[in-house]
Amino acid sequence: MRAVMVMYDSLRLDMLPCYGGNQVELPNFRRLAEHAAIFDNSYVCSMPCMPARRELHTGRPNFLHRSWGPVEPFDDSMPELLKQNGVYTRIVTDHNHYVEDGGCTYCTRYSTWECNRGQEGDPWQGSAAPYMDNPHSKPISDQAPEGYKALFDRMHGQDMLNRQSYKGEEDYPQARTFKQGVEFLRENAEYDNWFLQIETFDPHEPFDAPENYISRLFDPDRLGDLDWPPYAPVTESEEEIQCFRNHYLALLNFCDECLGKVLDEFDRLDLWKDTMLIVNTDHGYLLSEHGWWSKSVMPDYQEIMHTPLFIWDPRSGVKGERRKSLVQTIDLAPTLLDFFGVEIPKDMIGKPLKATIAEDEAVREYGIFGFHAGSLDITDGHYKLMMVPRAGVQLYEYTLMPTHMRMRFTVEELKDAELAEPFSFTKGCKVLKVPCKTKNVADMPAGTEWLFDIEKDPQETTPIMDEEVKLRLKAALTEILKENDAPEEIYECYGLTRP
């Protein structure tokens, strides 16, 4: 048995042809949909990038106990479990967060790994010269969240320096990553028992695509080179908004081209007969919808949380069929373990999707998702309840790996830390309990609850009032929190009764 995962970052569901997208031709995503099960109710769990990847390893929600951080010492890591059970595992990626403090233990869980440098301000190319001026018509720092202006300017200057090293399409990080992935397929097609993860940071911002993909869609000389939206409200003109969107579409077109190289090898090497293929993403992205750019600081709208997912399972041979069952990121680890015949650890909350792929068998009635110390949401696929923290409740990080995205926890943060008793999944280990602040959610004051009928109102334009539905969702949420051994303060923070 062999398996390949092709993972994207910030891939929008509604931009893809099988989900109704028609703004750009994507022949290889269309081709993929003809050869896999297409999931219509796939949702993230923990946001954003590395929290989602911890779930990809552990098969359990991350955001109830921890924000952005590494794989913990007590975590069950899917690629490591495969490796320990005789399955060779490899990741090739250009996702630069893997080589930062907050991602330092992920790649080393695989048998071997390769990380291609250069994405999103990655401190890669070296120059002692001052960072160059931002060429955008509006500096990205002008609308950056307070406290992040210097960071955004530094990242943008570094990104401009990195881009100077791309002489042709083959030099872009995504192209290098897929080239290495395809080479692995060619060199190992005759062998059994391996898992390959091909993971690209694209189409995450900045939307830096090779020039030929841009010129296919629009004239950059007329519309400009706006390709890095801020995490901020939309203040741009319609023409500027369209320029950002065009750059995203150009990069999506590049993603489609690279995907085609993998599909070509599946055809050429006849991998379809015994090789699972998963194509997924960590989350979506706002491209001016709801008056916002990007993710993280605004409510958890469908464009961010509702994700595309394709799975080809050679055991059932289901292709070109749609699946309505509610699935989440946490289901991918147990699905891969099950495929290779490896025992699924008791601490994995996610469920293997073999029967869901074959017959649309449901694995859950409800799914939860959100941000640590921020939004907490639940859906049944028909309704969605968004909740934000109440004011005045102290929340905590629970960890043995005290790092943030790009830095260690500060001494000041750790001064008030204490040891907490083990959780059900920490293998008897006590963990650091570090005080943290609740996150503000733009447009939703503290304690706000929004209920949407996402079947009738998929764009989430108007919250509804239905106390019966809200109470049902809250009761289900309480049970899920109990199953995950959520910290006690979570219940108080969101106005829930601890069972």
Image (tube, helix red, strand yellow):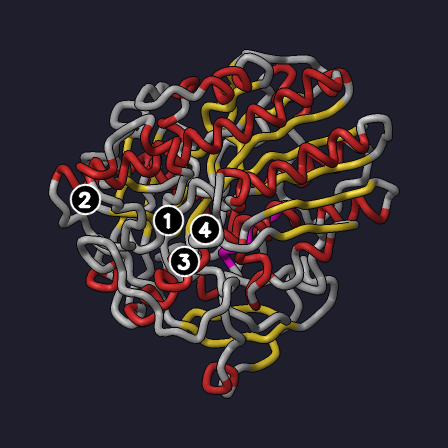
Of mark 1 and mark 4, the one earlier in the sequence is 4
Q: Which residue is mark 1?
A: 206
395 above or below 140?
A: below
- In the foreground, 252 or 128: 128
* Disc assigned to residue 159: 3
Q: Which residue is mark 4?
A: 47
Residue at coordinates 41% horizontally, 39% vertically from top-left?
209
Q: Secondary structure at mark 1?
A: loop
Of mark 3 and mark 1, the one earlier in the sequence is 3
- Quadrant the N terminus occupies: top right
Q: Quadrant of residue 385?
A: top left
Q: Position of residue 189 (x, y in %)?
A: 80, 27
Crowd rating for badge 3 (residues with CA inside 10 Å; few <14, some 14–19, many 20+): many
Q: Left or right: where does residue 27 sit relative to residue 140? A: right
| Distance (Cα) linking label 2 and label 1 | 19 Å
| Distance (Cα) linking label 3 and label 4 | 24 Å
Q: Which residues are magenta?
A: 59-64
Check contact, mark 3 vs mark 1: CB within 8 A.
Answer: yes
| Distance (Cα) linking label 2 and label 4 | 20 Å
- Residue at the extreme left: 237
* Labels 3, 1: front one: 3
Q: What's the amino acid at mark 3? A: Asp
Q: Position of residue 20 (x, y in %)?
A: 35, 19
Q: Secondary structure at mark 4?
A: loop
Q: How many marks?
A: 4
In the image, is residue 63 part of the stretch drawn in magenta?
A: yes
Of mark 3 and mark 4, the one earlier in the sequence is 4
388 above or below 100?
A: above
Q: Secondary structure at mark 3?
A: helix
Q: Position of residue 233 (x, y in %)?
A: 20, 51
Q: Which residue is mark 2?
A: 291
